[in-house]
Image (tube, rainbow, N blue to C red):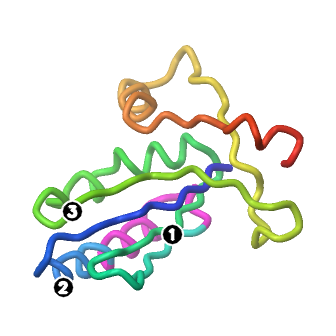
Amino acid sequence: MTTLLAHIKIKPGKEAKWEAIMHDMVAQTFANEDGVVRYEYWKGQAVNAYYCLLSFTDKWAFYAHQMSDHHEGHDFADVLAGIELEYVGPVQGAGGDLAPTLDPPLPADASEAMRTAQARFPLAIPAWWSGRQ
């Protein structure tokens, strides 16, 4: 499984456009993707701060999501002031029944899109997680 928390800052005045994009992204993701487990957007306390909790059956499903037509088809540059993707792992017995985040190697026959996604969104399991899965 692969789970992430996206820390998102939106440009001032772009909140309505951002939320419309997110509404479409969630609808398209659940309608067109098989490997999505959770895909939720939240407003934060800080002005123009948003969060997204994303969980996929594996990192290949996450990469397919990132490279999908419905993801690539939005003008994120117009609304985003910044975004940080943080890979997260559930605490055993307290992680909402999500499986651990894993980083399998890229298969030799991986498509160009998967190779691009691997380069853009590399997954690294922090050493301190070792033995805590």
Q: Amino acid at mark 3?
A: Leu
Q: Nearer the viewer, mark 3 or mark 2?
A: 3
Q: Amino acid at mark 1?
A: Tyr
Q: Which residues are magenta?
A: 23-37
> Dot 1 surroundings within 10 Å: few (below 14), some, or many (20 or more)?
some
Main secondary structure of the magenta stretch:
helix
Q: Is residue 58 magenta?
A: no
In the displayed image of the protein, which residue is found farthest to the front?
46
Q: At which x and y percent is residue 86?
A: 51, 52
Q: At which x and y percent is residue 54?
A: 53, 62
Q: Secondary structure at mark 2?
A: helix
Q: Is residue 58 above or below residue 36?
A: above
User: Mark 2 or mark 3, which is nearer the start of the sequence?
Assistant: 2
Residue visible at 49% across and 34% down in the picture: 122
User: Mark 1 or mark 2, which is nearer the start of the sequence?
Assistant: 2
Q: Nearer the viewer, mark 1 or mark 3?
A: 3
- The residue identified by callout 2 is 16
Residue visible at 27% across and 78% down in the picture: 48
Q: Secondary structure at mark 1?
A: strand
Q: Amino acid at mark 2?
A: Ala
Q: Is residue 13 above or below residue 7?
A: below
Q: Which mark is residue 39?
A: 1
